[in-house]
Image (cartoon, rainbow, N blue to C red):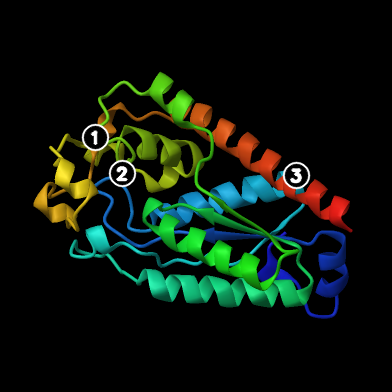
Amino acid sequence: MHFQNENSFEVEKKIAISPIAILPIGAVEAHGPHLPLGTDNILAERLAEKVAARTNAFVLPTLPFGQIWSLKNFPGSINVSNESLISFLIDIGTSLYEQGFKIFVMLNGHLGNAVALKEAARKLYQLHHDFKILYLFYPGTSKIVSEVRESESVHGSYFHACEIETSYMLYLAEDYVDMKKAITDMPNIPLSADVMPTPWEEFTTSAVLGDAKLASKEKGEKIISIAIENMVTLIEGAINATRTSN
């Protein structure tokens, strides 16, 4: 169910029946020559639709801008601060709570948003203890990622426009991928990048962190299927917790 397509005469009753809102959150940033700037938005939207179909949830309009400080100097990138993102999410969450929603799922397509989402969830919890807030970013997929990956990971936690993220796009939004332009870029990311502010242009000119040429739809399906199962399980757990508390 797409929330923005509802009307105010009927939506109140529908929220009472299914008080679950999923907010796709992404970013607009460089993703190499083979993927669009809005890759994270597209992935978040497609995931939200699949998860909503399994949980009877509302899908909110996508929040398209994220915290992309590391890539903000690349052509096409649009950055918002953590502080702005946190405030925006608190306002959205509070409004949803006041409308009668009991579960707010922030479905994230961009790793750089993680700090803001966690802080917003904590602040919303302090404001509304009976409001279940989840912040989800491909949960429980580290094992399957390591199994399907053929190329070496250039960083312990980053994946970007590489074999993995390109595989996600091939599975969820193949029309947006131009594999003829896919490249291999295995930058040497210094250890200091984990403990000091480090713009990515210091170690990459492409914003690709790995071998995008090795991406495949099949790899994407294997990983995304597990991510979706885990997201559905987490939401169902929140639903059961809400019922128990009532």
Q: Secondary structure at mark 1?
A: strand
- The residues tagged by marks 2 and 1 sit, at their Cα atoms, a distance apart of 8 Å
Q: Quadrant of the N terminus?
A: bottom right
Number of disc labels: 3
Earlier residue among tags 1 and 3: 1
Earlier residue among tags 2 and 1: 2
Can the viewer see residue 34?
yes
**Residue at image point 86% right, 53% down:** 243
- Asked which quadrant contains residue 102, the reply is bottom right
The label number, if any, that marks residue 160 in the structure image: 2
Task: Say what amino acid the circle numbered 1 marks.
Answer: Gly
Expressed as whole percent of the image width and height from the top left, the position of residue 154 reads: 23, 34
- The residues tagged by marks 2 and 3 sit, at their Cα atoms, a distance apart of 30 Å
**Residue at image point 19% right, 61% down:** 74
Task: Say what amino acid the circle numbered 3 marks.
Answer: Glu
Expressed as whole percent of the image width and height from the top left, the position of residue 171 reads: 48, 36
Q: Nearer the viewer, residue 67 or 56?
A: 67
Mark 2 vs 1: CB contact within 8 A: yes
Expressed as whole percent of the image width and height from the top left, the position of residue 169 reads: 43, 42
Residue at mark 3: 236
The label number, if any, that marks residue 210 in the structure image: 1
**Residue at image point 49% right, 32% down:** 141
**3 relative position to 144: left or right:** right
Q: Nearer the viewer, residue 245 or 96?
A: 245
The label number, if any, that marks residue 183 in the structure image: none
Earlier residue among tags 2 and 3: 2
